[in-house]
């Protein structure tokens, strides 16, 4: 389910969401929709969108406890020299690896999948293939689509509160670094020309990275625009709106 909350800061908005939904902060995903810093004639605020599983809706709607959370995955280190990221831990990981490998094969490409990292509510899987550039796709859209399907399948295995993160050729890290550079470059242009610039459509994670990167720049504001999964971030010179 999706909810929206506001606060003077990102932390205050997230705290309010956790309190009103009656769930822990690590049980939902946060997307920043808009940020506005405080000034002489207006107060600062942050608007966020919270994405939860059905369990949050059950708790708030009925007043009773939601379904029991799945057993957290053991925290592990990101793989170093171990081949294919180390041993598979349990039937669920084996099932997810088989599912993602099956998707790749049905697309007509070869490849292997292994565990990249384990966190309390995240499981990172690494795709290794000679067709990695195709599986990643333009701006990572193919990788995002595979990840979306993997998360749906994980939910059907009773792991709704666990996020599956797919990566290949360290694309996620390279993409984050690229987006941070883009955010600062566009912010400089906005300040110089005292206008606004609308960025390309991005997934929720990429948009949040843009928002948080520019959150501490006092004369620039950001806002998500559009509908659907791939919205755009507009970067404003402060006082333009």
Image (cartoon, rainbow, N blue to C red):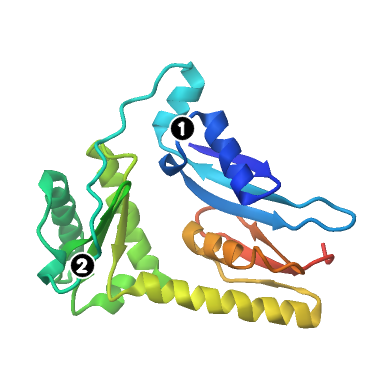
Dot 1 lies on which element? loop
Q: Is residue 125 above or below residue 170?
A: above
The residue where tag 1 is placed is 23
Dot 2 lies on which element? loop
Q: Is residue 126 left or right of residue 122?
A: left
Q: Is residue 193 left or right of residue 83?
A: right
At x 59%, y 53%, the residue is 32
| Residue 57 visible from this viewpoint | yes
Q: Nearer the viewer, residue 46 or 96?
A: 46
The residue where tag 2 is placed is 79
| Of the image marks 1 and 2, the number of the one nearer the N terminus | 1
Q: Residues within 10 Å of mark 2 (few under 14, many from 20)?
A: some
Q: Nearer the viewer, residue 8 or 188?
A: 8
At x 49%, y 28%, the residue is 22
Q: Nearer the viewer, residue 45 or 226?
A: 45
User: What number of labels is visible?
Assistant: 2
Image quadrant assignment for residue 110 = bottom left
Q: Position of residue 77 (x, y in %)?
A: 24, 61
Q: Is residue 53 above or below residue 118?
A: above
Q: Is residue 161 left or right of residue 51?
A: left
| Residue 227 visible from this viewpoint | no
Image quadrant assignment for residue 14 = top right
- Circles 1 and 2 in contact, beta carbons < 8 Å: no
Q: Position of residue 50 (x, y in %)?
A: 53, 43
Image quadrant assignment for residue 214 = bottom right
Q: Position of residue 200 (x, y in %)?
A: 57, 71
Q: Residues within 10 Å of mark 1 (few under 14, many from 20)?
A: some
The quadrant of the picture occupied by the C terminus is bottom right
At x 17%, y 64%, the residue is 113
**Residue sticking out furthest to the right:** 41
């Amino acid at each position: 389910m999706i909810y929206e909350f506001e606060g003077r800061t990102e932390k205050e908005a997230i705290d309010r969401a956790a309190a009103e939904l009656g769930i822990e902060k690590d049980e939902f995903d946060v997307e920043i929709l808009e940020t506005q810093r405080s000034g002489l004639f207006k107060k600062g605020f942050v608007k966020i969108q919270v994405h939860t599983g059905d369990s949050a809706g059950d708790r708030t709607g009925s007043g009773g406890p939601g379904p029991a959370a799945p057993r957290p995955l053991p925290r592990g280190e990101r793989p170093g020299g171990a081949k294919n990221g180390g041993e598979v831990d349990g039937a669920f990981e084996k099932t997810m690896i088989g599912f993602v490998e099956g998707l790749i094969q049905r697309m007509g490409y070869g490849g292997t999948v292994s565990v990249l990292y384990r966190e309390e509510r995240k499981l990172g899987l690494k795709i290794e293939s000679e067709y990695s550039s195709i599986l990643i796709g333009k701006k990572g859209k193919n990788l995002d689509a595979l990840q979306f399907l993997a998360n749906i399948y994980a939910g059907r295995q009773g792991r709704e509160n666990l996020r599956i993160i797919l990566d290949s050729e360290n694309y996620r890290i390279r993409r984050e670094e690229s987006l941070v550079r883009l955010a600062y470059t566009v912010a400089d242009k906005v300040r110089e020309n005292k206008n606004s610039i609308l960025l390309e459509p991005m997934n929720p994670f990429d948009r949040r990275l843009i928002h948080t990167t520019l959150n501490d720049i006092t004369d620039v504001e950001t806002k998500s625009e559009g509908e659907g999964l791939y919205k755009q971030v507009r970067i404003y010179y402060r006082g333009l709106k």
